[in-house]
Amino acid sequence: MAKKSSPRLPPSPEAREELLRVIQSTAAPLTATELVKLLVPPHQIAAKDLTPILDEYVAAGRLHKLPLATKTGKPRYWDRDAPAMSRAAAMEAVQGTDAPLTAAELAKRMVAPLKVTDSELTRLLEEHVAAGTLNLFPPKTLKSKPRYWNRDPIEFARLAILQTLAAKGPQTAAKLKLSAKGLADDQFEQIVTGLIATQQLWRQPPVGKAGKELFGGSPPSPEPYLRNVGIELTKVVSQLLAANVPKEDVRRSLVQLIEGAGITLGSAMPPGDDAHRAPPRSDGIDLIALMRRIEPGADRGALVGSRELRRVAKLEKTRFDRAALELARDGRLSLHRHDYPASLTAAERDELVTDGDGTYYIGMAIRQSTG
């Protein structure tokens, strides 16, 4: 006669609690089969009994059930919300970048408990875009993917335009717009208008018949525009002097001609007043004189970079910053603020002049009233 097996008793409360403790100690979610192997006597639970208990804990909100890792895989269980952790890891990765990145690029920077595929990460990022916590940027090339960033597209475009001007000099509107990819025409015009209003951008009229209007980070130098005028003027003056026209008459006519064009000739300050208007110095260094030496257009308001001027002045950063700020307070210099210092590395910020309150200046220009 066959011996009857005794009925299997349900897992004890202690075994169930041990199950939770084991799950809480794992570094990643596991399947029921994997969890069975971690349960040791006297708290073992049969595989057929384990899945209902796990699903019961999921329904009670004490565990999370993750979707299948593969088509033939089994559900995984964990006490932590892995998708939420992945979303948080994605945001942390985005916030640590200095520029928009694709999902594949962000995946390499993520620190998450589970490996996230590019498609899964794209879905997470799109959720953030829909929620307004991330912004979508167009691909860099036709073959690349969209990029994501937590910063404002308009602000990013403004920074890109200023960086292009600093690196390449005056550019056409078309080339500036290329540096700020993805901007609509009205957005680009809005940025340009704002930069011109805050004197971070200057229109530079075309030079010659084939020239195009350019935009620069400083006012245009008059020399290219006046070159042909100077050539013609030299010819005319030579002809007048050859005809024995008194030099004083020629000079008077030239002064009237120039002042009729809106430029008043004469000294910017009364004779002998230089001693009362000497620019402040720091450690015997005359910053304004140095600016004139390294930038021929300094007296016309051309921008001199903070890094270049400090290198020539050979001043310790704190003293250099203090000297520049004093000149600005005295009305001798105009400091040009960096719009997005948070996008710079600490080393890059250290190259700029700072007031110590979070404002950084990329360069400075001599005020036009400065003698």
Image (spheres, grey):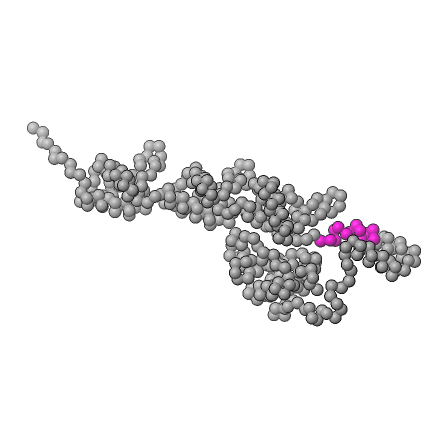
- Quarter of the N terminus within the rendering: top left
Q: Is residue 34 visible?
A: no
Is 296 on the left-hand or right-hand side of 346?
A: right
Q: Spot the residue most to the right.
A: 243
Q: Which residue shows up at 61% across the image and 68% down it?
A: 282
Residue 306 position in % (x across, y down): 60, 59
Question: Against 124, is 281 above or below?
Answer: below
All told, the count of numbered labels is 0
Q: What type of secondary structure mainly makes up the magenta span?
A: helix
Q: Residue at x 57, y 41 (%)?
A: 183
**Residue 145: percent from left, percent from top:** 50, 38
Residue 99, above or below 297: above
Q: Tell me residue 303's x, y (percent).
A: 65, 56
Looking at this view, is 35 or 370 the one in front?
Answer: 370
Q: Magenta stretch?
A: 221-233
The quadrant of the rendering that contains the C terminus is bottom right
Residue positioned 47% across, 41% down in the render: 129
Q: From the top left corner, tell me how far across and down residue 79 is, in percent.
A: 30, 44
User: Residue farthest to the top?
Assistant: 1
Task: Say which residue appears at 67% left-offset and 64% top-offset.
Answer: 289
| Residue 228 part of the magenta-drawn span | yes
Q: Is residue 152 visible?
A: yes
Q: Residue 337, located in which quarter of the rendered image?
A: bottom right
> With respect to residue 247, does 46 lie above or below?
above
Q: Is residue 230 left or right of residue 358?
A: right
Q: Residue furthest left?
A: 1
Taking the magenta stretch, the answer to whether it contains residue 176 is no
